[in-house]
Image (spheres, rainbow, N blue to C red):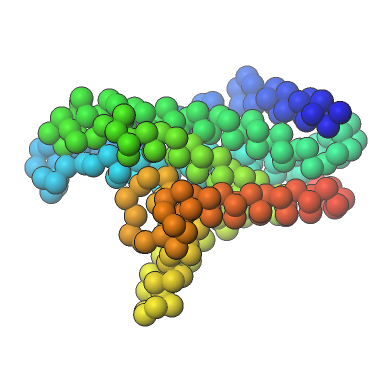
Amino acid sequence: MIATYLARSVRSEATKVGGRNPLWYAVIPAAVLLPLALNFGIAEAAAANVIQGAGGMDTDNAAYWVLVFSTFILMSAGVSALGAEFKDRTAETVFGIQPRRRLLPIAELAVFGLISAAVTFATTFVLLGVFPRLFPTIWGRVDAFSPEGIRLLICVPIVTVAVCALGLGVAAFVPKPALVVTIVLLWKFGIEVFVTFVPGTLGTTLQRLSPFKNAELGAGQLSTIKTLFGGPDGSLLYFVVLCLAIFVLGTIRLSRREPNTD
């Protein structure tokens, strides 16, 4: 029975993203074009000796801009969708039709997570498969079908889905998209950068516990830390579990609160 309700909720969310939704003409193009444009510009500059690029690109560093930009851009789509249910005062209607409130964020994760995974997979594949042919002297060592390339193709989408779950979990607590995105980005680019300046063993341990640093390591991206969790798989699992824990807590909180549409 719950599977039937969930399927209905997923179909409903999928319908909402159809048509002229900003997801298709703003979010996805930005998530795809930004890392491609940055890598293209850097490769062109390196090829022209404008910047130092003699070392070339390695497979385990090829998805850096996807992890830095695309994941958070795509996360913002799901966060905005959940926040809009409260801002546009449709949450009460949704909960009236479907009293199982926990299904709303779960359905949004299913829809936006699947779309986000597909987008980051395609973007990563273009980087790994096309750029070595466009820039053989710079990207010649990059191989989509090497062990490192296959790991990126599999794990970058997993990290993206986990980031979407994280954003939706925070949004379930605070359904204000701008604030949610700020909180997540502050952690990634503020707190995790700050701990790199903490001296000694404490600083090293904090870095090795940093969720997003473990996400990068787990995805197969070149990382500046050594894992505390037995390897890349352990680091990836650590990040996914943290994100899902926040998502579950947010979903529980949403299911027990009155829809605040102020």
* Residue closer to the observer: 134 or 58: 58
Residue 10 x %, y %: 72, 28
Asked whether the viewer can see residue 164, the reply is yes
For image coordinates 24% across by 35% down, the residue present is: 142
Q: Up-down: is 170 above or below 69?
A: below
For image coordinates 53% across by 55% down, the residue present is: 238
* Residue closer to the observer: 120 or 261: 120
For image coordinates 85% across by 52% down, the residue present is: 257
Quarter of image, res 88:
top right
Assign the N terminus to one quadrant of the image.
Answer: top right
* Residue closer to the observer: 152 or 234: 234
**Residue positioned most to the front:** 230
Quarter of image, res 20:
top right
Q: Up-down: is 10 above or below 41?
A: above
Q: Up-down: is 171 above or below 45?
A: below
* Residue closer to the observer: 230 or 59: 230
Residue 69 vs residue 175: left or right? left
Residue 222 x %, y %: 32, 50
Residue 137 x %, y %: 12, 34
Asked whether the viewer can see residue 45, the reply is no
Residue 209 x %, y %: 48, 64
